[in-house]
Image (tube, grey):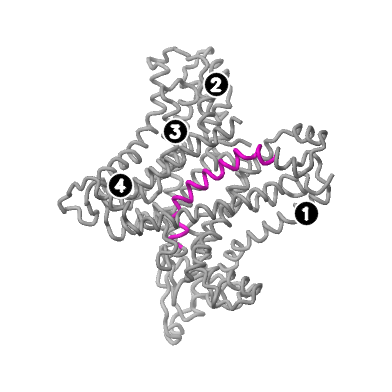
Amino acid sequence: MSLTTAHSVVAPSANSKRIAGAIIIAYALISIVPLLWIFATSFKTPPDSIAYPPKIVFQPSIEGYCNLFTTRTRQTPEYINSLGPATGFCDETVRKRNMVIAGPSNFLPRFVNSLIIAFGSTFCAVFLGTLSAYGFSRFKVPLADDLLFFILSTRFMPPIAVAIPIYLMYRELGLSDTALGMILLYTAVNVSLAVWLLKGFIDEIPREYEEAAMIDGYTRLQAFWRTVLPQATTGIAATAIFCLIFAWNEYAFAALLTSGSAQTAPPFIPTIIGEGGQDWPAVAAGTTIFLVPILVFTILLRKQLLRGITFGAVRK
Amino acid sequence: MLNRTAENVARATPEPLARKVRGISDKGLAWLFISPTILLLLAINIFPLFWAIYLSFTNYRANRPNEVVKNLGLANYQRILGDQDIWIAMQTTAHFVFWTIMLQTLIGFTLAWLIDRKFRGHAFWTTLILVPMMLSPAVVGNFWRFLYEPQIGLFSYVISFVSGIPPTSIQMLSNVSLAPWSIIIVDTWMWTPYVMLICLAGLRSIPEYIYEAAEVDRASNWRQFWSITLPMALPFIMLAVLFRGIENFKMFDMVNLLTGGGPGSTTEVASITLKRQAFESWRTGYSSAFAIILFVAVFGLANIYVKALNKVKQR
C-alpha cells in the first residue's frame, strides 16, 4: 500500500501514519504557541514582557496577577520606606517598583458579572430549550419546520444589527447595563442552539419509554419527568456547557450594551492599562484566569463538540 | 439540514397520542412547552427587528430622543445603496469571508485527512488543536495585538528571525497592505480547527466497503481520493463553509480589537461600519436600514446555500 492511501481502513502504511502524525503534531505545537505565550507573559514583570528579543527564559513573577486584582499608585521611595512592613505577597511585589496598592481593581466585579450572566442565561436557555425540544420532538406541532427554522434564523443577524433596537428597548425598559438585561439577551441567543441540540438528543430516546410509563398510569408530564429527563441528562449537560461557553466568550453585545455595572470580563480585559500603555502581564493574567474554565470544559466536551458547533446537524 | 428536520418530525410523530391529561390535551401541552421560547424570541428578536424596520424609514437619532422623528420613506435605503463607503465595507467583508474560508477549508480538510489515519496519539493531538476555537474572540484579538507589536511581539520576532527583515518594518496592524492579513491570519488560526472537526466527521462517515471495492477495481489512490473521499465529504465541507461564512460575514470582535477598522478604513468590515454609524455617529435610522439590508443579505445567501447543500446531499 502506498503513501497516499486515503482511508485508515485500507490500512495506511506505517510510514504514511508516521508522516501524518508528524505534520499534525507540528501543527498542534505551532498553533498552541500563542496560548503558551499568554501563560508565560502572565508570569513576567512588565519590563520582561516587552523586552526585545522576546524573553523565553525569565525570572517568574506574580506582578501581573497583583496588577490585575489591584490598582496601584506610584510613590517616592522615601514615602514607601516610611510605611510599615509590607502586608502580604502582592504588597511586597508592588513596592519593589515604588508603588503602593490603592485598592482593588475592577477585574473581580467584572469576572463575577461574567459568572452571573453566563450561568444565569445558561440555566434559562437550557430550561426553555428542554421544554421546547421535547415539544417539537414528541408532539405534532403545526408548522414545526418553519418554527424550528425561525428559531435558527435568529442567529443569522449580525450582533451589532440586533444591538441597535435592543439598546433602544432596554433604555425604555430600564434594562440597559443590568445583569438581567444581559441574561435575557444571552438566553434568547442561546435558546436556538439549545432547542436544536436537545431536540436531537431527545429524538434518540425511544418513545416506548414514555408510552410504557403512561400505560402504567403516569400522566404525560410525569412520564416526561420520570423517563425522558433522566435519559437526556448527558445531552442536557453538553448543551449547558455549549451555552455557557458562548455566554462566557461573548464580546459584541457586552461591549455595546454594558458600560459599567453589568460589564463582563471580555470587554474589560483589553482595557487594563498600566503605566505608559497596556499592562501586558496583567492582561495576560486576566486572560489566563478567564481561559481556565474553557480549557477544562473543552476537555470534558471532546465527544460532543461536533454536535454543539453544528447545531446538532452533524453527529459523531 | 432542513430536510433532515422534516424527516425527524415525521419519524418522531408516527401517531398522535390523543389523550387528555388532567384537563390538558397533548396539543395544549405542546404549546405550553414551546410557547415560552417563542415568546422570548418574539420579545428579544422579532419585536426589536420590527422596531429597526420602522426606524429604518426615519431620521431618528438615539442620542437625541426628544427630537421630532420624520418619516423619510425609502430615503435611507437609497442613500445606503449610493454610499461609496458602504460598498467598500461590503467589499472588504467579502474579501475577508473569501480568504478566511479558502484558507480554513484547505488547511482544515488537510488536517482532518491526516488525522483520519489514526496515528498513535491522534486523539490527544486533535484535542490540542481544537483549543483555539474555544477561546473568546475578544481575548484572542486583544492578545494577538500584543503578538503583532513590531518592537516587542513574538510574531514579528519570529518573522524577522526567519526572513531577515528588520522587526520594525513588520507593521502587521498599521501597514495598509498587511492589516487585512493580520486579521485573516488570526481568524484562520482560531477557526481552522472548526472546519477540521466537521471535515473529520465527514471522512469518518465514509463506509469502508467503498474503499475495499475500489481496491478490488485497482483504482489508484489519487482516483480514490477524487472519486470517493472528496465527493463523500463534500456535504460536510459545505456545512462548515456555511457556518463559517455566516459567522465571518458578521465578524466584529476580532476586527474591533485588532485594528478597529484601520488603518484608514482598510479593515472596516460591515459590522464595524454599522457600529460607527449607530454608536459613534448616532445615525440610528440610517444604520437600522443598513442592518436590515445586511440581515436580508445573510438570510438570502444562507437560504440559497442551504438549497445547494441539500442538492449535494441528495446526490
Say whether residue A285 is visible. no
The residues bearing labels 2 and 1 have C-alpha atoms spaced at a distance of: 45 Å
Q: State whether residue B14 is above or below residue B250.
A: above
Question: Helix, strand or loop at disc 1?
Answer: helix
Q: Chain of mark 2?
A: B
The residues bearing labels 3 and 1 have C-alpha atoms spaced at a distance of: 44 Å
Question: Helix, strand or loop at disc 2?
Answer: helix
Among the two numbered marks 4 and 1 on one chain, the one whose residue lies closer to the N terminus: 1
Question: Do the numbered discs 2 and 1 sit on residues whose CB atoms are within 8 Å?
Answer: no
Q: Which residue is mark 1?
A: A19
* Image position of B240 (left or right of A104): right
> Which label sits in the foreground, 3 or 4?
3
Image location (x, y in percent) of residue A145: 45, 28
Question: Helix, strand or loop at disc 4?
Answer: helix
Q: Which residue is mark 2?
A: B11
Magenta part mainly helix, strand or loop? helix
Report the magenta residues as a range.
B229-257
Question: Do the numbered discs 4 and 1 sit on residues whose CB atoms are within 8 Å?
Answer: no
Q: Which mark is residue A165?
A: 4
* Mark 1 burial class by Cα count in 10 Å: few <14, some 14-19, many 20+: some
Q: Which residue is mark 3?
A: A149
* Mark 4 burial class by Cα count in 10 Å: few <14, some 14-19, many 20+: many
Quadrant holding the C terminus of chain A: top right
Among the two numbered marks 3 and 1 on one chain, the one whose residue lies closer to the N terminus: 1
Question: Do the numbered discs 2 and 3 sit on residues whose CB atoms are within 8 Å?
Answer: no
